[in-house]
Image (cartoon, rainbow, N blue to C red):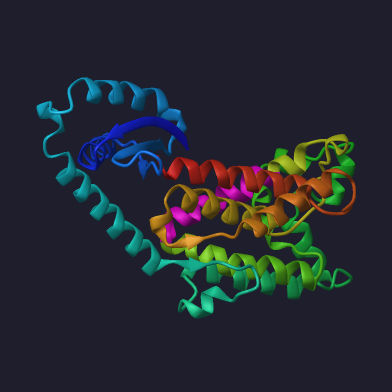
Amino acid sequence: MRSLGTIKGRKHAETFVAHLLTIGISTQIEELANQPQYWELWVRDEDRLDEAKLEFDSFLASPFDAKYEGSLGRAQEILEEKRRIREKAAANLRRVHPTQKLSLAQGKIPPLTLTLLVLSIGIFLFSSFPASRLGRQIIGQLSFVTEQDYKDGQDDPSASLRKGEVWRTITPIFLHGNAIHLAVNMLVLVSFGSMVERLLGTPRYALFVGVLALAPNLLQGLLPAALFGSPFFGGMSGVTYGLVSYLWVRTSVDPTLGVVVPAPFIILMVGLIVLGFLGMMPGIAHLCHLGGFLVGMIMGQASNR
């Protein structure tokens, strides 16, 4: 806060503070201990200090100007509206923790999130036996590029895509290397995906998930190894990173949605990305994580416009 100046008389101080509130400038007043009847004004929004000073000089020059009439009443209406918004937000507030099974507490899992969950688990179970013919076929059909195409294309990561197999830009999200990888991704998917699907509706959510799969997968699959790329990857992590960052950005701008994503969770996710690019977590598709996180943030900001 920054001091704006002093005004003599509580009534004048309250009238001016009310006037500032009607133009969106928040202040507070304090009576001076050594000067009774004199009130010091403090501006909370320092970016608008210069504007407040101009209003202050204008008020001191003509405190009984007609434009100040009714300021107290209008300010009271503004404060009442803000109080209702705060109460509504508090009533709807749900704190999101990564270890909570939020979807269970909120009812049934929405249809598309449930479909992604079932497909991921089912494909993991059937593809967990790469020595079997079925396991090899599943991995071969869902991977970003087949090993044979990659070899025939002289290490071209887009070799399978060039053959028209465009589904491979999406399907690697259903391949998980182990049970822990699957479990973590499914927990985040169900927790955050359920909320995003309820928020957007299933059709828009489907489009959003498609973008969250497509962009990170292309980033991870097509960039060279020198930039941490590799066409041999799998997992829902890019999607889940995007769901979390989307909710984080959107609810930060619009808290009335009633969801708060804890800052430590965001710090943890960003920290894992940083550690990955520092080479401390090999064998993980870090570009998927980064791509999903950035796409989610962009979409979250765009939704609030």
- Determine whether, in the image, residue 185 is placed left or right of residue 108: right
Using the image, determine if residue 278 lies above or below residue 3: below
Q: Please tell me whether residue 177 is drawn above or below residue 272 in the rendered image.
A: below
Give whichever of 170, 147 is nearer the camera: 170
Could one spot residue 201 in this view of the protein? no
Residue at 77% over, 53% down: 272
Q: Is residue 204 magenta?
A: yes
Residue drawn at x 15%, y 46% as measured from the top left: 73
View extreme (front): residue: 34
Q: Position of residue 136 (x, y in %)?
A: 82, 65
Kindly tell me whether residue 169 is visible in this rendering.
Answer: yes
Range shown magenta:
199-217
Quarter the C terminus occupies: top left
Q: Position of residue 241 (x, y in %)?
A: 64, 54
Q: Is residue 13 magenta?
A: no
Looking at the image, which is closer to me, 149 or 197? 197
Q: On the image, which quarter does residue 166 sit in?
A: top right
Residue depicted at 57% across the width and 68% down the height: 191
Can you give x and y, in whole percent of width and height, for residue 4 in the image?
Answer: 39, 30
Dominant SS of magenta comes to: helix
Total count of labels? 0
Q: Name above or below for residue 139 compared with residue 303.
A: below
